[in-house]
Image (cartoon, coloured by chain):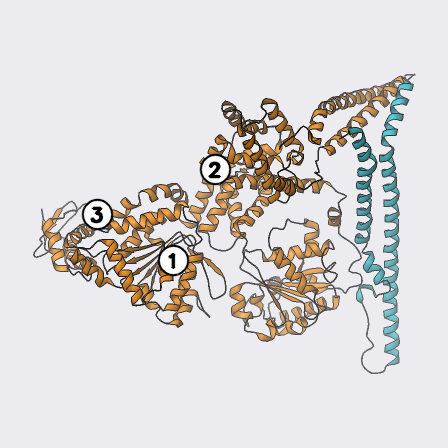
Amino acid sequence: MNLTLQYLQWQFVERPKEILKAIKNFLSFGAYFFSIKQTIASLFAPWKNITWSAGRGFDIQAILESAFSNFISRIIGFILRIFLIVFFIIYEVLVIIFGIIFLALWILLPLIIIIIFISGIKYV
Amino acid sequence: MFNLKTTDQYYLIKKERYFWFLKWIGRISSAGFILCLISLVLRYFNKAENLSALLGWEMIFFSLLILSQHLTLFYNDCKKIRPQKSLQEALEKGTNLAPFLNFNSAKYVARALKRNQFPSASILLYHFLDEKNPKIVFIFSRLLINTKKLKTEVQKIMNSGTQEEFESIFQEAAAIALKRGYNLIKEGDIIAALSEKEPLFRQILIDLELQKKDIENLSWWIEATNEKIKKAKCFWDYENLLKYGSIGGDWAFGYTATLDRYSIDWTREIGTRGFEELIGHKEEIEMVENILSRKGPRNALIVGNPGTGRNIIIHAVIKKSLTGKSTKEINSKRFVELDLIALAADIESFEQSEKVIATCFNEAQRAGNVVLIINDFHNFVGGEKKTGLTDVSSIILPYLTNSAFPMICVTDYQGFHKNIEKKVELIKLFEKVEVRELTPEETMLIIEDKVFSLEQEYDKFISYPALKEIIRLSERYIPYSFPQKAISLLKDSFAFSNKYTDSRIILAEHIDQIVGAKTQIPVGKIRSKEKEILLNLENILKKRIVSQEEAIKEVSAALRRARSGVQNRKGPMGSFLFLGPTGVGKTETAKALAEAYFGSEERMIRLDMSEFQRIDDIPRLIGGENQEGILTTKVKEDPFSLVLLDEIEKAHPDILNLFLQVLDEGYLNDNLGRKVSFSNTIIIATSNAGYQIILEALKENKKMEEVKKELLDFIFKNSIFRPEFINRFDGIIVFKSLTQDDLIKIAQLQLEKIQKTLTEKHIELTITEELKRKIVELSFNPVFGAREIKREIQDKVENAIANALLSDKIKNGDKIKIDPETFEIIVL
């Protein structure tokens, strides 16, 4: 066992792997939180499954009325789901940005510590 | 060959001082950083110039602080040893086990190795008793063992050991770690191994009635708790993130306004409450998942006794659904329990409530994502219409056939057989999942899981022996099922301790008191007196039983064998077949045994087996349609008692076959298929089959061994009992017939009872020899034994005293005797 080698592996391989795993967890959670699978699968489905039936017989007015109402229900459902998808995308982008920043900070941490230390000596 | 010096752990131990130095750098840097910061702020507000030097120091301290934290984090990660090889393989091949030690264990072993090349178990234990290690503190504090005191005592006996002894400790510890499924040997595993090897520690555990497996259990408990805490801290863990719930999942599914009003949304409840630990019932969970995922009707009927954890199974399926770990048919479903009781409380008319129930079913079906749960299903399909109960059987049928609308209904065995089983059209739409009762070991894990929250709530500490006592006593004395009865007892113990004791520690004695108060059985007394009773059983029984020395000796010896653990057994605590003529003391011995062992004659379940001569009598014994089983119900209600089966030879052979299982395995299945345990009973069967042989033997003065042999020959020859039935008893006890002298002694005992009653009225009765002889003379009949004496005393003596008392012939304070010829009362 060599502590220096072990440190290098820990700093640049093991821990970054853990950070990537955490980022993946946050990304997966986003898909769960915004129910993205169901949302995309039911993008044009009526809002809360509210639908109207034209009833029995051939009544053109009833058919048109129910078709229009169902169309409106689907439009409402679509708009709300689009909002949800937009929020999901924003969330995922933010997770990726902050994740990358955190990962970069971690990898550069030894360098950052050295820079701060040397700068401190310069000031003194 | 154990060699620590070549391991990574040893390398890290050597480097520990550098990291200890780092810790100090961190402390100094944080102090310097804070001071510089304060100074900087003050100077800045005082408009001081030239702050750059101060800023420079601030930066140096900050960088050192981060560096020390960073490297400490690295070192702590290094200490998490992950062996590359398999511990199982190393143990089998006998290779070096040192690379499999966790860091702390390696550190303690290294310290012990400094003292001796092959440290003895005592040296190792001494170094493992580290009061700064929370795991060690946990194990010993739960055992109520003072580590400091133990360490001092161990220090006195520390001597060098042998290589063989030293290596065997790690082999044992490795085996313990493997049992838990780990590839690493931890402190707890080594302490468990030392519990058998270190003499002082072993003696302490023997005194506490604990074993190595208890130390293993404690070690696993703390390890599991640590794991749980560690997992809870990782907020970025996927399962932890899931607690925040989700939005939009049900936008494509229908509204369930009425259902929401009369239901409990378990998916939401469990999501916000957090996921509870699941112990046991893995097969049942899998079965429910399979049923809910298959094609065709997807309805599960969970059948199990109350308290077996039926709802826990549903909660586990919900957890898997929430975390997306179940099948695609179950994942993201909404599990909703229809609250029919709340509905009945809200709506009085049956017609109206039926309408609302139909609406609820309709909404759930239309929603498309609901799994409906109905608890106590039997109450709502029994055809009864009374307050709080609505019959839903006709409403539910069409919905059960819909594969898009799965249901989980919960019932118990009694309700299942009474109300559900007979409804063919209903039952065929369900798949039955039977819930087994958890084992005491699984229950122990469950109550361990609940201890911390209760300790926090009541500000009390519960010892491990107390937890063991909860399991032991609830198994032995409390009816109903595991784990619920043990959980209830655990909660009761905290409430009891809070109310009645100032002690902050809950001890095993407190548990005895609670169970004693609950069941009216002097539990603690029985426990502490059991050994005493067993050792003195002959003397205790002799006080009540006249003449049957050999029988008493044999019963006592057999019971001692059974209870001392000499025999590896599953059956009842003891089982005996008493053979002998009537009136020789067979039943009296059973009563005396019940009093001595179970605290009272009342703890005897007595069955006259002559009432079970037909095969149709089986339902009366173990339960049948619309009737409780005389035997099974009584044993379930009173698991700690003596079962007396009088005149067993008269029972139907098929009924005797039922007892084969009881005597062999210690349980009987009742008519509902529920296991009734007899493991805490003593079973005594009596029979006067072949009594003529005993009467003859008395005349011929034969030895008891010879009589017993002849009697058994007679029994087998006449097919009264089959050999496999006889062989299952712990002892076949032959009671000899009574002589006149024996009967005189019995008359004395019977008259003493009257004497004792009269003493309470301050009347002194003198028992004369003549009176006893006269009673025996009047009642002597070798065929009926002592039975006639009791009748004769009742007829002659008790009647005479009663008449005298009523006619004021005798008063309080009188001294009396009875004329043996006329049976008149003579006031002295």
Q: Left or right: B84 with respect to B376?
A: right
Is B354 in front, or is B308? B308
Q: Residue at 51% x, 27% y: name it.
A: B150
Subunit of mark 1? B
Locate the N terminus of chain A and report the quarter of the image it occupies: top right
The residue tagged with tag 2: helix, strand or loop?
loop
Q: Which mark is residue B756?
A: 3
Instruction: Tell me if residue B179 can be seen.
Output: yes
Q: Residues within 10 Å of mark 2 (few under 14, many from 20)?
A: few
Chain that is cyan in the image: A
Q: Earlier in the sequence, mark 3 or mark 2?
A: 2
Chain that is orange in the image: B
Front: mark 3 or 1: 1
* Mark 2–mark 1 CB contact (< 8 Å): no
Instruction: Tell me if residue B389 can be seen.
Output: no
Q: What residue type is disc 3 on?
A: Lys
Q: Residues within 10 Å of mark 3 (few under 14, many from 20)?
A: some
Subunit of mark 2? B
- Tell me, yes or no, whether dots 2 and 1 are on the same chain: yes
Q: Left or right: B318 with respect to A11?
A: left
Q: Which mark is residue A119?
A: none
Q: What residue type is disc 2 on?
A: Thr
Q: Earlier in the sequence, mark 2 or mark 1?
A: 2
Residue B144 x %, y %: 51, 34
Q: Which mark is residue B501?
A: 2
Residue where numbered disc 1 is placed = B728
